[in-house]
Amino acid sequence: MTNQTQNAPYAVASLVLGICSLVLSCFFVGLVCGIIGLILANKGLAEYDAHPDLYKGPGMLKAGKITSIIGVVLGALYIVYYVIVVLIIGSAGLAFLDAFGGGF
């Protein structure tokens, strides 16, 4: 019987990237961290499923996957928010120029 003290592969990396994606979700970096964390979590879960007796458990991998998913969703929502804000500001600027004779 083997000593089960080793974490599953990519467990720590996926969890750290998932947490970073939550913290930095209002920036583009959070979306990138979430996507990378999700990829690593899926690779780690596949390796864990292939050899479950070699590792402690999939807890950290599942937590990394969940935090990465939440970070990706929040990052995508922030990108949509930024696009809407830019469109509103742009249309307000065009309306201002049109009202004062500087429009197109």
Image (tube, grey):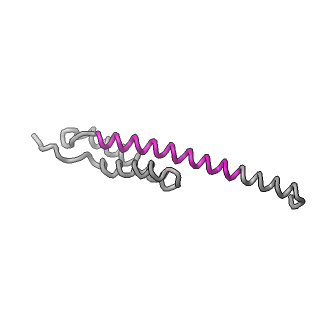
Rendering coords of residue 100 (x, y %): 88, 58
Residue 102 colored in magenta in the image? no
Quadrant into which the C terminus falls: bottom right
Query: Eyeballing the image, is 70 above or below 12?
Result: above
Query: Which residue occupies 41% across, 52% down?
Result: 20
Residue situated furthest bottom in the rendering: 102
Location of residue 93 by image quarter: bottom right
Residue situated furthest right in the rendering: 101
Exactly how many numbered labels are in the figure?
0
Residue 62 colored in magenta in the image? yes
- Majority secondary structure of the magenta segment? helix
Location of residue 56 by image quarter: top left
Query: Which residue occupies 74% across, 54% down?
Result: 90
Query: Which residue occupies 12% across, 42% down?
Result: 2
Left or right of 37 in this view: 100: right
User: What span is colored magenta in the figure?
Assistant: 59-87
Which residue is more in the foreground, 77 or 1? 77
Rendering coords of residue 8 (x, y %): 26, 45
Rendering coords of residue 71 (x, y %): 46, 46
Query: Which residue occupies 39% across, 51% down?
Result: 17
Rendering coords of residue 27 (x, y %): 52, 54
Left or right of 10 in this view: 77: right
Quadrant into which the N terminus falls: top left
Left or right of 81 in this view: 100: right
